[in-house]
Amino acid sequence: MNNKIDNNKMHKLDSIFIVGIGVIATLSSMLDILLKQDFPVYSCGSIYGSYALWFILLIYSSLKFKEQQGTPKCIKWYTFFLVPFIHIAFVIVGFAIGILLSKIFNL
């Protein structure tokens, strides 16, 4: 019974990965809107930050969790191909929040 509950919990590194990419992408896209950029400079540049976060967590998880149970599920080598899609989803959320804030505060 206890093992079933533990299997449903998200690994700590997975949550750091998702929250980290979410913060990086959302804040960068909000900066683009609030600073009235003609081109989404910060949103495009922040993909490098997302890849850096993924790469650091990948190395850490491969060194720390060699052949152990309970390894992170989201931080794998093939996530390299999924990082842009996750990033774009959070950028869209950031654009929506940025537009909403600029309309509320008349920026």
Image (cartoon, grey):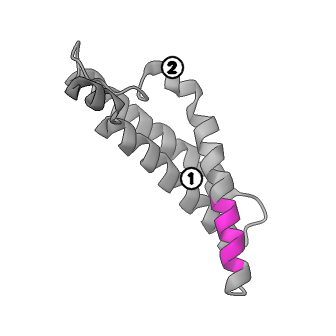
Residue 66 x, y percent position in the rendering = 23, 16
Magenta stretch encompasses residue 48: no
Q: Is residue 78 above or below residue 10?
A: above
**Farthest bottom residue?**
106
For marks 2 and 1, the one nearer the N-term is: 1
Magenta part of the protein: which range?
94-102
State the residue at coordinates (55%, 62%): 27
Determine which residue is flagged by label 2: 78
Q: Is residue 2 above or below residue 106?
A: above
Residue 100 visible in the snapshot: yes
Disc 2 residue type? Answer: Tyr
In the image: residue 14, left or right of residue 41: left
In the image: residue 69, left or right of residue 87: left
Quadrant hosting residue 98: bottom right
Disc 1 residue type? Answer: Ala
Determine which residue is flagged by label 1: 25
Magenta stretch encompasses residue 97: yes
State the residue at coordinates (76%, 59%): 39
Could you tell me what secondary structure mostly forms the magenta stretch?
helix
Residue 52 x, y percent position in the rendering = 44, 39
- Sort mark 2 into few (<14), some (14-19) or many (20+) by Cα contacts within 10 Å: few
Quadrant hosting residue 47: top right
Secondary structure of the residue carrying tag 1 is: helix
